[in-house]
Amino acid sequence: MTIGEALTHSRILLEKHGIPDPETDSLLLVSHITGLDMLMTRLEKNRPLTTEQEQRLSSLLLSRTQRKPLQYLLGEQWFYGRRFIVDKRVLIPRQETESLCSLAISFLTDRKNGTALDLCTGSGAIAVTLAAECPHSQVYASDLSPDALDVARMNATANQVTVSFCEGDLFEAVSEGLRFDVIISNPPYIPSADCKNLQQEVLKEPVMALDGGGDGLDFYRRIVTEAPHYLKPGGALMMEIGYDQGEKVSSMCVNAGYVDVLVHRDLYGQQRMVTGKRPL
Ligand code: GLN
């Protein structure tokens, strides 16, 4: 089979199984097994695949028809211009979360030797991005899942940054006495009952990274209450939220005594982040 034939075969197969974007998925999967970039894959249509490449492609296509997320099959996702290793142990970083990182980066850039803590770090996408973009800051990150932390550590190493990782429930394992300029989090925020009705690919992601309890707000209640003990005066709490949670999470922050509480929109115009500061 040539690369051109592999592309056509993959596209038709994925299309038949109702995969949303068969053209892109085929191109990425064929590029992945040949090791060529997307442009070269398009140009080298007549190059034959080896038997081993054909076998790898059929097994990847089978997994994709079973709705395994494309990023898990490729083993990677790009986030804020960097490559992150992803597998079923971690949530796949979403583009929307890049906006949350941008907020933290501008805040940290204004402060010398800043410190940041990323709660529910998962793949480490946020923590690694902050460490890379703010080289004068010290970045800490926690997660309850040792499996996720293994992936996050690989991502810090692969991106050549230092992040202090700790295993624990939110602030539980954060060293006594540490105070942060920024506490950032993209916690699980989907109401438990909705977790069953997600897109099939999302159902293959770790439920513990998605399930935010009965009303989806369990993590915000705990983070908003506990964060002031770990923030420096004037330090900021920055959280990603679901598109319909802006009002509830921002009132939670106002009621807990935060100042400058704001709801921010993502690049698609959806309410996506809430920030607030510990008073000076
Ligand atoms: N912080 C990680 C991310 O934004 C994981 C979030 C999570 O597991 N809920 O991708």
Image: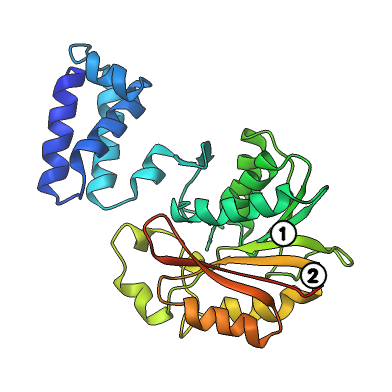
x then y, percent, for residue 99? 51, 54
The colouring scheme, among rainbow, by chain, secondary structure or one colour, is rainbow
| Residue at point 29%, 63% (across, down) | 199
Q: Nearer the viewer, residue 54 or 130?
A: 130
Amino acid type, residue under disc 2 in the picture: Tyr
- For the N terminus, which image quadrant? top left
x then y, percent, for residue 240? 53, 65
Q: Nearer the viewer, residue 179 or 159?
A: 179
- For the C terminus, which image quadrant? bottom right
x then y, percent, for residue 21? 21, 45
Residue underneath mark 1: 117
Ligand 1 within 8 Å, label 1 CB: no
Q: Is residue 140 left or right of residue 35?
A: right
Image quadrant where residue 237 sits: bottom right
Q: Nearer the viewer, residue 224 or 102?
A: 102
| Residue at point 62%, 41% (across, down) | 154
Amino acid type, residue under disc 1 in the picture: Leu
Q: Is residue 217 above or below residue 126?
A: below
| Residue at point 10%, 46% (across, down) | 16
| Residue at point 59%, 77% (across, down) | 220
In terms of secondary structure, where does tag 1 sit? strand
> Spatial distance from mark 2 to mark 1, Cα to Cα?
9 Å
Q: Are marks 2 and 1 in contact (CB under 8 Å)?
A: yes
Residue underneath mark 2: 230
